Image (cartoon, rainbow, N blue to C red):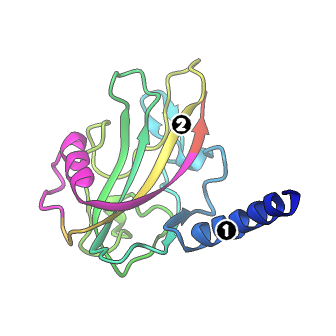
Amino acid sequence: MKRFVAAFIVGCSIFGSQLYAEGFQMTSDDIIGQLANRQVFNGFGCDGENISPSLRWDNAPDGTASFAITMYDPDAPTGSGWWHWLLFDIDRKTSSLSQNAGDPTLNIAPKGSIQSVTSFGSKGFGGACPPQGDSPHRYVFTVHALSVRTLGIDENATPALVGYNLNKNTLAKASLIAYYGR
């Protein structure tokens, strides 16, 4: 019995490792547990650099036609969270974003991609800026592998409309979570 249990545990860990290694995933050299001042908003009482992080993803599922990136704060005291970044219609051949791709004026984001309106009311990346004195908020960066080449919406789409279209067309997603408080 002990041999069976040991073999079962070893088999599960090998199988689990293969699933993780083959799974859709996102990584970043810029996001390591806590957000840095580079990823903090410049406005709303915050004085960060408002620079979006570099992101990489791999092992997208078969049938992926495009990607989208979102940054969401579920802890914002709004009743509906806070959307900090909505970037979509990213070509399926793209597997990374450079640091500061979230600034639409720099034209660093992949050609043909769209950065729509955030909860700040502006387009592009809007960094972390929780209310002073709140517990640290969670900031969820997600890459969505989509079944469609384009979501069929433009840069004026609201976060709710983008979210609806993402949920309708997502094949798989991978996320990184970082924290920030002030």
Label annotation for residue 68: none
Q: Give the mark, 2 or 1, whose residue is nearer the N terminus.
A: 1
Disc 2 residue type (three-letter): Arg
Residue matched to label 2: 138
Residue situated furthest bottom in the rendering: 93
Quadrant that contains the N terminus? bottom right
- Is 175 magenta? The answer is yes
Whether residue 17 sits left or right of residue 139 in the image: it is right
Q: 59 and 107: which one is in front?
A: 59
Between label 2 and label 1, give the one nearer the viewer. Answer: 1
Residue matched to label 1: 17
One can see residue 116 in this view: no
Residue situated furthest left in the rendering: 152
Residue situated furthest right in the rendering: 2
- Is 58 magenta? The answer is no
One can see residue 180 in this view: yes
Q: 26 and 85: which one is in front?
A: 26
CA neighbours of label 1 inside 10 A, class few (<14), some (14 to 19), many (20+): few
Whether residue 144 sits left or right of residue 140 in the image: it is left
Residue 153, x across and y down, in percent? 13, 57
